[in-house]
Amino acid sequence: MWLRGFVVSCLALGIVAESAPARADAAEVEALIAKGNELRRAGTPGPALPYFQKAYELARTPRTTGQLGLAELAAGYPVESAEHLTAALQSPNDPSIVKYRQILADALTMARSQIGELTIHGNPPGAEVIVNGHVVGVLPLPLPIKLAARNTEIVVRAPGHSEERQIIPIAGGQRHELAVNLPSTEKPAPPAPSVVVPANPPPATAAPPATPAPTLVQERPAGASASASGARTAAWIVGGGAVVALGTAVALHLAARSNDTSFNNACPQQNPLDDPGCKDTYEAWQFDKRWSIVGYVAGGALAVTSAILFWTSRAPAPETTAHARFQCAPGPTGIGCQGVF
C-alpha cells in the first residue's frame, strides 16, 4: 500500500510541475496580447506587431494566430495577414474564433483585396529571383508570387549574364506577368577559318627559285645610339644644375650687397662690431658673399661640364651604306655574271 501511495504522490507532483509553466506561458501570452492591443488602439500598429509575434511563438493557438493576422494587416503586411487569418478560421469551434469570426472574416477579405500575384518566367533556367531584397526562388518559378499592392523591386540575376532590375507596380486582386531574358556577358569563341579545296586543282608548275641579290648594309651600332642619348640626357641635367647654381649665386650676391650697404649706412665707423645689430648684419654680409662665390664657381663648372656633354653626344655624320649584288648579262661566249658593289 505504501508503494502505491508513493507512486501516486510522485505522479501528482509531476502533473503540478508540468502545469505550472503552462499557466505561466498562458499568463504571459495574454499579457503580450493585451499590450499589443493597447498599442494598436493608440494608433501605433508597427510597434504593436512584435508583441503579437512573441505571443504566437509562445503558444500557436487559434487565438494568437488570429490576433497576429489582425496586427499584420494593420501594420501593412497583407500577405502574411491573409495566411494567419485563414489558419485561424480553420478552427471554427474555438471560443475565440466563435466570438470574433465575423471580424476575422472581414479582415481576411480586406487582406486579400490588398494582394496581387506576379508570375515570372524566362531565361536562363536557374537564375535567382529577388523580390524586395529577399530571394524567393530560381527560374522557372513553379507558382505565382503573392505580393502586397505597392511598387515592388524585382531583380533577376545569374552568373555569366547581365542583371535585370525592374520596379513593378502591383495592384490588389490582379495577376501580373514578367518575362525576362538575361543576355550573356561571355564573348563567343571566334569561328575557325574555313579552307576551300577546289575540286580539280591546276597542276603545279615548278619554277626556278629566285636568288635574291645579297645586300651589304653597314649600320650604326645600337650601343652608340643609346650612349649618345644617355650623354645628352646627362647634359640637360647638368645644365639645369648650372642654371640653379648660378641663379642662387646671383641671389646671394644681391643679398650680400644689400647687407653691405646696410652695414655701411647704419653702423658707426669705430668698433662697429660691438653693436649686436651691426654684428649680425656684418655676419650675414660675409655669409652671403662667401656662398655667392661658391655658387658662381659651381655654376661655372656645371656649365662647362654640360657643354662638354652636349659636344660629345652630338649626332655623328651619316655613314655611307654599301650595297652589293650579282648581275648577269649575255656575252659573246654565253651568259656572264659578276658582282657589282
Image (cartoon, rainbow, N blue to C red):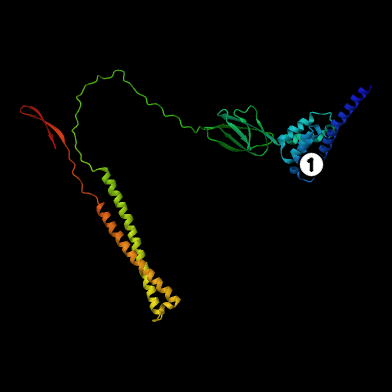
x, y percent for residue 283: 40, 72
Residue at the spot of label 1: 36
x, y percent for residue 35: 80, 42
x, y percent for residue 58: 78, 34
Q: Quadrant of residue 79?
A: top right
Question: Which residue is at a point 61% across and 35% down the rendered structure image?
Answer: 130
Q: Is residue 181 left or right of residue 173?
A: left
Q: Is residue 25 left or right of residue 5?
A: left
Q: Amino acid at mark 1?
A: Gly
**Residue farthest to the left?**
332
Q: Rate crowding at label 1 as few (under 14), some (14 to 19) or many (20 or more) other CA atoms within 10 Å.
A: many
Question: Which residue is at a point 91% across and 25% down the rendered structure image?
Answer: 6
Q: Is residue 89 above or below residue 43?
A: above
Q: Quadrant of the N terminus?
A: top right
The foreground one among 22 and 248 is: 248
Q: Quadrant of the C terminus?
A: top left
Q: Quadrant of residue 276?
A: bottom left
Q: Is residue 270 left or right of residue 83?
A: left
Helix, strand, or loop for circle 1?
helix
Question: Which residue is at a point 82% across and 38% down the rendered structure image?
Answer: 28
Q: Quadrant of residue 112?
A: top right
Instruction: Judge whether residue 250 can be spotted in this image.
Output: no
Instruction: Judge whether residue 111 can be spotted in this image.
Output: yes
**Residue farthest to the right?**
1
